[in-house]
Amino acid sequence: MTSTVSRRDFLKAGAAAGAGLTLAVMLPSCAPGGGTPVTTPFKPNAWVRISTDGSVTIVVDRSEMGQGVYSTLPMLVAEELDVPWDRVTIEQAGAAKEYFNSIFPSMVTGGSTSVAAAFMPLREAGAKARAMLVAAAAAAWTVDPSECRTEAGVVIHTGSRRRLPYGELADRAALLPVPEKVTLKDPKDFKLIGTSVPRRDLPDKVRGRAGFGIDVEVPGMLVGVVARSPVFGGTAKSWDEAAAKQVPGVRQVVKLSSGIAVLADGYFAARKGRDALQVVWDEGAAAGFSTASMRKEMASLINRAGHVAKKAGTGALGSGRRLSAVYEAPYLAHACMEPMNATAHVEADRCTVWAPTQYQCGMVLGGGAQEVAAQIAGIDVAKVTVHTTYLGGGFGRRVMQDFVRDAVEASKAAGAPVKVVWSREEDIQHDFYRPPTYARFAASLGEDGRPTGFTARVVCPSIVASAFGAPKTSFDDAAVEGIASLPYDVPNLLVDQVQPDWAVPLGFWRSVGSSQNGFLVESFMDELAVLAGQDPFEYRRALLSKSPRHLAVLELAAAQAEWGTPAPEGRGRGIAVVSSFGSYVAEVAEVSLNPDRTIRVHKVVAAVDCGTVVNPDVVKAQVESAIVYGLTAALHGEITID
């Protein structure tokens, strides 16, 4: 196939002897005002360097937090460039506007957008580089480029079988014009895309050499631990600074916007100093809030008409059999494997940040690490350098900037580089939680058992109002995500939302609203199947004729799980199908009850349609981790407030 991208999408640089071919590639789908030329190889949206030794360096502009972007994104370039995977070197991009995500006008990793946003632009980047190398070889041989082909980093003249490695062509190719049109590979000719090539981040991770945020060391660095209010929104009234400074290794005690920080030569001294502060807190207006009071308020609010998110047909229930059910989902913490941390060094005219962040720069959601650091340091954004480390899990938690703010404020106050480290307990207690949900579903069934009407009222606080200052009266569609988009064929549908406002901080959690709402919808579908006297798989199947991708994964999961055959003695099977962020997943779980009534999950069969798969092993790992993450949340993850 043929793709067209403006010549302005490319910047050629580094044609000096020995420098090799450098292509700085603007991704038009990933930046506002696509087509703006990149003026320096340090600020491209994505770029490729081909050295005279034939090695290829690819800059990755998304954060690697275990989801595999250090492999999947470079694979797109390497596929079209036609280079062996073992010759590719990965570099993490710095914070720059050229890396803005096409969906969010910021440099941010989230929303399952990394591969989708880069799929065509990165392939085009590789194809254009390859076309320039072919043109350089053809000129050297005085033949037409159409007589040449590429293979494993080499240009080959088909007729004479002459060969020139990319490295020997790099300087000459750098002098050629960038083609405006290139032909991308037919998918049937893919050699990398669709294969499970080894992940580039794993060797260093398994050998303990990977650099996570918590591993950062800077000369002269202090380590900070922060005393935070045990009540959301509370502030410190008094503290014993002298007692903290009696702890060996403690150097300073500074007040931050989040609490009182103790800075020391190492983590344990800082933590011991923090514990000695004896802070007296003004607990504020949220002191009386608890899980019990929240549930009582939600049970009352469910009787109040809310904002209508979706209405189809009359939106009313019909006559005949009816069923109503109430479901609840609790607050959940992200519980990343690596607790929150960041390192910052604020100097007179610049600031450097090292952070395991999902959000490097931009103006949405209150600004990224670069903007937050600039505001605190009182300097221009251009004076802030952000080094993104590996992330020990993200799940949306590291889109927030509280841990970056801690480090920058502490460094500014201390006049030295500071790494602020959270403990596991602090990480759980001071998260931006998945919001709780209280929902009432109702449906009417016709004589055939199919729903004739379906209503859902959801009580759920707003993430965007809580975390990012959106008007509290605005409607947050994450609260009804997966309900308003009900895939089942129901003629009359009404979904509305009531939005309470509480002090508990909220944030984006893995799959956002679909995480709890998928559970709500599929639980209710099971109950409707029971009322209709029908098999839960067949019941869903009959209602998905207008949702072919849901239907396909549902049928595949059922077939692979041998649905309809007897389960092993003492076990039962359940089935569900959910879509989120462009992917469709059906699962069959085989479970049993232990004598103490706890649940044991023996097997989960998952069928997934996520579109074109770049690296099957990466997708498999994502699905496996999602199953474990979901089970952990459902069985053990409830966050309660006393």
Image (spheres, helix red, strand yellow):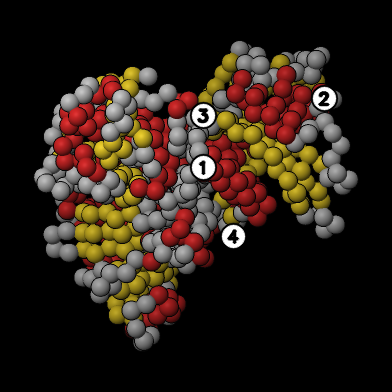
The residue drawn where x is 61% and y is 20% is 547
- 626 relative to 453, above or below: below
Q: Relative to residue 606, is residue 591 drawn left or right? A: right
Q: State the mark number for residue 611.
A: 3
Front label number (1 vs 4): 1
Residue 26 makes an appearance in the image: no
**What amino acid is found at the position of numbered circle 1 in the picture?**
Ser
Q: Which residue is mark 4?
A: 642
**What amino acid is found at the position of numbered circle 2 in the picture?**
Gln
Check the image and name the residue furthest to the right: 569
Quarter of the image with the N terminus is top left
Whichever of labels 4 and 3 marks the residue nearer the N terminus, that label is: 3
Q: Relative to residue 340, is residue 598 drawn left or right? A: right
Q: State the mark number for residue 534.
A: 2
Whichever of labels 3 and 2 marks the residue nearer the N terminus, that label is: 2
Quarter of the image with the C terminus is bottom right
**What amino acid is found at the position of numbered circle 4 in the picture?**
Asp
Residue 146 location, quadrant: top left
Q: Which residue is mark 1?
A: 196
Front label number (1 vs 3): 1
The residue drawn where x is 23% and y is 54% is 385
User: Where is residue 17 shown, x and y percent of the image?
Assistant: 11, 46
Depth order, front residue of 445/588? 588
User: Where is residue 638 shown, x and y percent of the image?
Assistant: 62, 53
Callouts 2 and 1 close, C-beta under 8 Å: no
Estimate the spatial distance between the alpha carbons at disc 2 and disc 4, rounded to whole Å. 43 Å
Identify the element where label 2 is drawn. loop
Estimate the spatial distance between the alpha carbons at disc 1 and disc 3, rounded to whole Å. 16 Å
Count neighbours of disc 3 (C-alpha within 10 A) and say few if under 14, some if 14 to 19, many if 20 or more.
few
Estimate the spatial distance between the alpha carbons at disc 2 and disc 1, rounded to whole Å. 41 Å
